Image (spheres, rainbow, N blue to C red):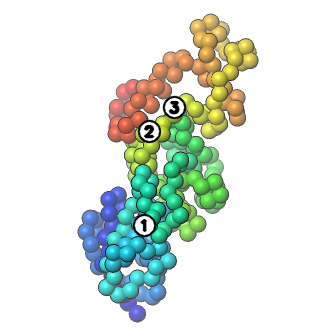
Amino acid sequence: MAKTITIRFYQELNDFLPSVKKKTGFSHTFNGNMSIKDVIESLGVPHTEIDMILANGNSVGFEYKPVNNDLVSVYPVFESLDISSVTKLRPEPLRNPSFILDVHLGKLAKYLRMLGFDTLYQNNFEDNEIIDISVKEKRIILTRDLGILKNSKVTHGYWVRSQKPGEQVAEVIRRFDLGKSIKPLNRCIECNGSISPVEKQEIISQLKPKTIQYFHEFYRCTSCGKVYWEGSHFSKMLNKIDLFRNGERTEKELKNK
């Protein structure tokens, strides 16, 4: 038997809708005993982008079965606002987010590591592997592939809208309210390992003569052994971090630094 509901999506959830359905309530008819999760994803919106669903003013879970003439409101993830007392969708938001990225987001992974965020990335990760790691380690999936986010096992994920790495960083910072959580140069850009101070004599064999002569403070990745110091590359990294911190800069401004 066909059922008709009125449904409205709020804020950035409208990114997934055709223009005639954006920022307005619209009628939607479907057949069978579908859950609200299935109804929503049939309209193109991944469940991982959603933090609260109201059916006739009451918070409901993804398993809710809409009935004829229901009025449904769908809200995006509130990572910076604790709504655990009213939402029925997941136990709690992620207050200290860590990430796993798909194969299309390698540059974004390096930028997030530069800002101090725990970010897993390999260019040979399979979709199922990303999903399994995300569930096991409670990592947010960042992806350009909507199919990953529609997998029923995924609980936290975000579809990155921009295709430009600099804009992607600003987007993620805004989306998860990370501006105050930036801890630059705590993680290795290459492997995501932790960086710790190291005595110059311990790594002197890895340094070039001018580096030995002009620099005295060094850091080393505890995982891969990569050595860092405050050279010209360091000041460039700090400039990029300043641009990223407020989450509002553009790709053009990033390239000019």
Horizontally, residue 111 falls left or right of residue 211, namely left
Single out the residue that lies furthest toward the top.
213
Query: Where is mark 3, residue-wise?
Result: 184
Q: What residue type is labelled 1?
A: Val
- Nearer to us: label 2 or label 3: 2
- Identify the residue shown where x is 60% and y is 55%: 138
Residue 100 in the image: state x and y as whole percent.
57, 50
Whether residue 252 is visible to the viewer of this picture, yes or no, is yes
Task: Please state which of residues 28 and 122 is positioned toward the viewer in this rendering.
Answer: 28
Question: Whole-percent x and y of residue 230?
Answer: 55, 18
Q: What residue type is labelled 3?
A: Pro
- Categorize mark 2 by other alpha carbons within 10 Å: few (<14), some (14-19), many (20+): few
> Is residue 155 positioned above or below 234 on the image?
below
Image quarter (top left, top right, bottom left or bottom right) of the N terminus: bottom left
Q: Which disc is residue 198 wearing? A: none
Identify residue for label 1: 86
Question: Percent position (x, y) of residue 184?
Answer: 51, 31
Q: Percent from the top left, x then y, of residue 171?
A: 40, 46
Number of numbered discs: 3
119 horizontally vs 166: left or right: right
- Nearer the observer, 248 or 159: 248
User: Is 256 located above or below residue 203 in the figure?
Assistant: below
Tell us which disc is closer to us: 2 or 1: 1
Label 2, secondary structure: give it: helix
Q: Do the residues labelled 2 and 3 touch (CB within 8 Å)?
A: no
Q: Mark 2 near mark 1, Cβ–Cβ under 8 Å?
A: no
Label 3 and label 1: CA atoms lie apart by: 35 Å
* Residue receiving disc 2: 180
- Relative to 83, 209 lies left or right: right
Q: Residue at x 31, y 85 (%)?
A: 69
